[in-house]
Amino acid sequence: MTNVTNLPAIDAVADNDLFYVRDASDPTTPDKKATGAQLRPTGARISDYLRYQGNITIPTMAAGVEADATLTITGALVNDNVLFNLAVAIPGNIAILGVVVTATDTVKVRFRNTHTSVSFSTVDVACVALVIRHTV
C-alpha cells in the first residue's frame, strides 16, 4: 500500500486530478474518487489569498445602531470574498453583520450594537481577515 506522506506534492490541482474519498454515506462501498473539478464551483479557480492580521476600531454606537469600520488590505479588489474574525472575545452586545471589499485595498466591516438601551464606546480589537480571489 502507498504511504501518502512519502508521495511528492503537486503545485496546483488540475480539473482531471483524482482524489481518494471515503464516502461515509455509502458504508457498503465507501471507496470513491473525486476530480479536482468537483472540489470547486463550476468555472471557479482560487487565484489569490491575502491575509490581514492587525487591529480594527469598532466605532462608538448608540443602542441598536449599526456602524462601519474599514481595513486597508493591499491587493483586495471589489468582488473578492472576505472571511473575517476577531482574534479576541467579541465585545459584549456587538454583532458582526457583514464584510465586503468596497474599493481597491479597502474592506468594510459592519458592526451592530445589539443592546436596547446602552451605547457602545469605541475600542480597538485584534482581528484576522482572509481575502480570497477566484477567477472564472
Image (tube, rainbow, N blue to C red):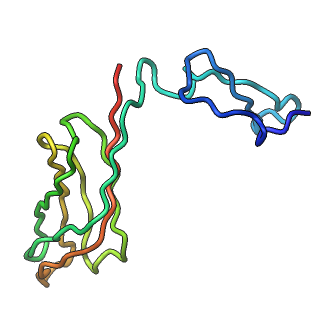
Apparent side of residue 128 relative to residue 28 in the rendered image (left or right): left
Q: Residue at x 67, y 24 (%)?
A: 34
| Most foreground residue, 42 or 52 | 52
Residue 33 position, x and y percent, is 73, 24
Image quarter (top left, top right, bottom left or bottom right) of the C terminus: top left
Q: Which residue is drawn at 56% across and 17% down?
A: 15
| Most foreground residue, 97 or 34 | 34
Residue 53 position, x and y percent, is 31, 62
Image quarter (top left, top right, bottom left or bottom right) of the N terminus: top right
Apparent side of residue 18 relative to residue 54 in the rendered image (left or right): right
Residue 7 position, x and y percent, is 75, 34
Apparent side of residue 118 relative to residue 29 in the rendered image (left or right): left
Q: Which residue lies furthest to the top in this view?
A: 16
Look at the picture and state if 96 lies above or below 41: below
Look at the picture and state if 116 lies above or below 40: below
Residue 118 position, x and y percent, is 13, 84
Q: Which residue is drawn at 42% across and 25% down?
A: 45
Look at the picture and state if 43 lies above or below 64: above
